[in-house]
Image: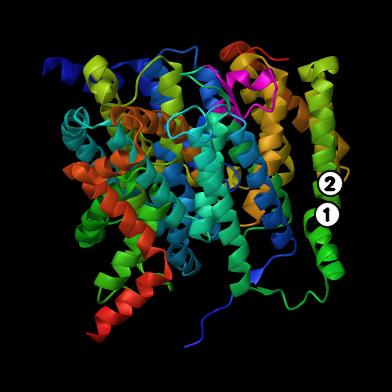
């Protein structure tokens, strides 16, 4: 117990870790707020610089950026009607109308407090559930991992982007990229096109930097001339009665955020959409109608997306499966540092888990401090013209990629993935599912082959095993329902049910 | 109740056909892996993924039946013109070409020199000729990159 407490408080008591967390949160708020920069991009680039660091230092900085970045997107959503991050899209629905009414300061203050409440609830759920889930996960068979990975990829395919088909294509494309290189079991080259360079595979950080950094830089070239409208900001700290008034809603939407965040592959953007929808359906008398500046429409997504951070860590630390794109990148960081994300992490390196929990809580406290101060400097910094930002993003991407293995070929690959990502983005494909595919592809391959070996390579027995075990049966049923929910059959069934 | 009909963007259908071709290419390459047709081999999962890509790209192409072309687009030639106008605007083409030249130049001109030239050129171009301020911003950016990456993070740069 005393060890657990010392790990929990490590980031609070070590000045270096304290400083890195604070720096991460501050940087995250600005990165999340500046449209065109994303938390995933920042953490991807950061991995390449921090792999020589002590793991605690690297994690402290990444956790800070993650927590700050998820919140930061809301500021530009409120002030400029430009969500800095996908998870802040719903914040703009009511946040910007509030700013237009001259209540930008109050909206920012309330969103800060609610984000912190959501974030802390997420951390509490992480601390309370993850150790038990990890114990349970030790009993999972390879087929269960296979099914959980399939479910995660299916959820991210169906919940993000324009269509399920596009989502599934993105996931499969990512998994295919993840399989390039030498097969770990038979040492056969796979999808290498005969190239020696590709035998070692394509480093996922290269793919991430290309898709999130370069592709975004190219995409932002379309919005070069967009000039945001400035808002007056004052009275930032919200009165206590206002916070108490919205507390029940924030607790409900925090729970939505944690649950959605904990589903492998989902994340804050989907959590905030669900929470906004919940608020619209359950709040009978909002302060003003939703979409016209309702505080409830601001509170719901803001608590949910920050609560989803804690939720996203649950599958990552217990199953080794990312809760969203950022935790997919953080999994990469843990692996680079020789750690083993998954149920064994709790047994082999419990200090990493408790350190992360303590660090997330600390990051939320810094979020409260930085969120309620420095608004004037903030509004200056987010006005950095794209003409300066876009070329600098490319340079950062080059530095980040080259510093991985000092290999220029990887820099060219990064540019290639950037161009591919640009076109995919233009035509409605999401980058998140591709990255999750890259990370989960090798895991899916491994668990599928282990599951197949366990039934003597007999296809019929493999299919039977998917429904013979209770956990596998539940997972298979959920997968079937998710698939069914995305077919025209769903409409027909709902219609019949309503008629009866 | 009328359902909003989605519109296809200029070039979207061609892109989706290219994805189908790409999926076929991946399938062919996956079959070349030894044991691609067996249930448990190095090739089985890549073959499965390629089939998923193929099926989803066919579904994407089928989804065009429920969409309509942008009414402003009159013909295939006009669609081509709209596509070029949207995605090959001068400032996008310039950035793409200069980026490729920059990456090629890093090896023989060193990172800092090529980055200085790249940033200065892009800032001057995008900021419409404000040369002095662009050069100052470039110098500051290079100084920050040097301090941050070479001195603080100690990363190897080309």
* Residue corresponding to mark 1: B89
Instruction: Give the secondary structure at mark 2.
Output: helix
- Disc 1 crowd, CA 10 A, few/some/many (<14, 14-19, 20+): few
Residue A10: image x %, image y %? 27, 18
Position of A174 with respect to A440 (left or right) is right
Residue A434: image x %, image y %? 53, 42
Above or below — where is A124 with respect to A358? Answer: below
| Quadrant where the C terminus of chain A is found in the figure | bottom left
Letter of the chain that mark 2 sits on in the rendering: B
Residue drawn at x 84%, y 38% is: B97
Residue drawn at x 23%, y 61% is: A249
* Residue corresponding to mark 2: B93
Residue B96 quadrant: top right
Residue drawn at x 46%, y 70% is: A101
Residue drawn at x 32%, y 32% is: A451
| Quadrant where the N terminus of chain A is found in the figure | top left
Residue A307: image x %, image y %? 30, 46
Q: Is residue A13 magenta?
A: no
Tell me if label 1 and label 2 are in contact, CB under 8 Å.
yes
As measured in the structure, the alpha-carbon distance from the residue carrying label 1 to the one carrying label 2 is 6 Å
Residue B133 quadrant: top right
Q: Which residues are magenta?
A: A187-206
Above or below — where is A35 with respect to B111? Answer: below
Nearest to the observer: residue A305 or residue B71: B71
Instruction: Give the secondary structure at mark 1.
Output: loop
């Amino acid at each position: 117990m005393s060890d657990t407490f010392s790990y929990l408080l490590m980031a609070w008591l070590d000045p270096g870790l304290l400083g890195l967390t604070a720096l991460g949160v501050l940087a995250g708020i600005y990165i999340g707020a500046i449209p065109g920069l994303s938390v995933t991009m920042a953490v991807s680039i950061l991995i390449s610089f921090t792999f020589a660091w002590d793991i605690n230092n690297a994690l402290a900085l990444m956790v800070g950026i993650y927590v700050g970045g998820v919140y930061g997107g809301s500021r530009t959503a409120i002030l400029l009607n430009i969500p800095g991050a996908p998870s802040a899209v719903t914040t703009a629905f009511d946040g910007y109308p509030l700013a237009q009414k001259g209540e930008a300061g109050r909206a920012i203050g309330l969103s800060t407090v609610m984000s912190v409440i959501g974030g802390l609830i997420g951390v509490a759920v992480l601390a309370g559930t993850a150790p038990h889930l990890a114990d349970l996960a030790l009993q999972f068979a390879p087929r269960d991992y296979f099914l959980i990975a399939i479910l995660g990829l299916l959820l991210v395919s169906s919940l993000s982007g324009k269509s399920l088909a596009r989502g599934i294509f993105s996931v499969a494309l990512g998994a295919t990229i993840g399989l390039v290189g030498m097969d770990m079991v038979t040492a056969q080259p796979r999808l290498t096109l005969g190239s020696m360079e590709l035998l070692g595979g394509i480093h996922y950080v290269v793919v991430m930097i290309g898709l999130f950094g370069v592709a975004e830089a190219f995409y932002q070239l379309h919005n070069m001339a967009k000039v945001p409208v400035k808002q007056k900001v004052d009275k930032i700290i919200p009165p206590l009665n206002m916070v108490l008034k919205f507390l029940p809603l924030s607790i409900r939407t925090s729970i939505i955020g944690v649950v959605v965040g904990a589903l492998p592959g989902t994340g804050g953007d989907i959590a905030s959409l669900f929470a906004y929808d919940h608020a619209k359906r359950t709040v009978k008398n909002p302060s003003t109608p939703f979409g016209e500046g309702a505080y409830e429409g601001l509170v719901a997504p803001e608590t949910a997306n920050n609560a989803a951070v804690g939720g996203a860590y649950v599958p990552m630390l217990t199953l080794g499966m990312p809760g969203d794109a950022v935790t997919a990148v953080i999994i990469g960081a843990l692996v680079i540092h020789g750690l083993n994300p998954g149920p064994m992490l709790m047994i082999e390196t419990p200090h990493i888990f408790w350190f992360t929990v303590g660090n997330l809580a600390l990051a939320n406290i810094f979020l409260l401090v930085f969120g309620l101060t420095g608004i004037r400097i903030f509004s200056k910094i987010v006005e950095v013209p794209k003409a300066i930002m876009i070329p600098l993003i490319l340079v950062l991407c080059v530095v980040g990629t080259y510093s991985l293995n000092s290999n220029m070929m990887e820099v060219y690959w990064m540019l290639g993935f950037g161009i591919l990502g640009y076109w995919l983005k233009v035509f409605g494909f999401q980058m998140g599912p591709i990255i999750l595919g890259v990370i989960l592809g090798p895991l899916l391959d491994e668990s599928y082959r282990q599951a197949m070996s366990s039934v003597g390579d007999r296809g019929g027995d493999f299919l039977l095993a998917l429904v013979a075990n209770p956990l596998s049966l539940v997972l298979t049923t959920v997968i079937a329902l998710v698939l069914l929910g995305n077919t025209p059959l769903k409409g027909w069934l709902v219609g019949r049910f309503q008629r009866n | 109740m009328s359902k909003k009909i989605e519109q296809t963007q200029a070039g979207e259908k061609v892109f989706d056909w290219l994805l189908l071709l790409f999926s076929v290419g991946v399938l062919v390459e996956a079959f070349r892996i030894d044991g691609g047709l067996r249930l448990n081999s190095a090739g089985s999962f890549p073959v499965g993924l390629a089939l998923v890509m193929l099926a989803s790209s066919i579904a994407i192409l089928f989804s065009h039946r429920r969409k309509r072309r942008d009414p402003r687009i009159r013909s295939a030639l006009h669609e081509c013109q709209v596509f070029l106008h949207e995605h090959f605007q001068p400032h996008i083409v310039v950035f793409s070409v200069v980026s490729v030249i920059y990456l090629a130049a890093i090896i023989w001109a060193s990172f800092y020199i090529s980055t200085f030239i790249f940033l200065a050129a892009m800032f001057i171009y995008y900021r419409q000729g404000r040369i002095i301020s662009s050069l100052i911003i470039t110098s500051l950016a290079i100084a920050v990159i040097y301090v941050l990456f070479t001195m603080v993070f100690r990363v190897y740069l080309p």
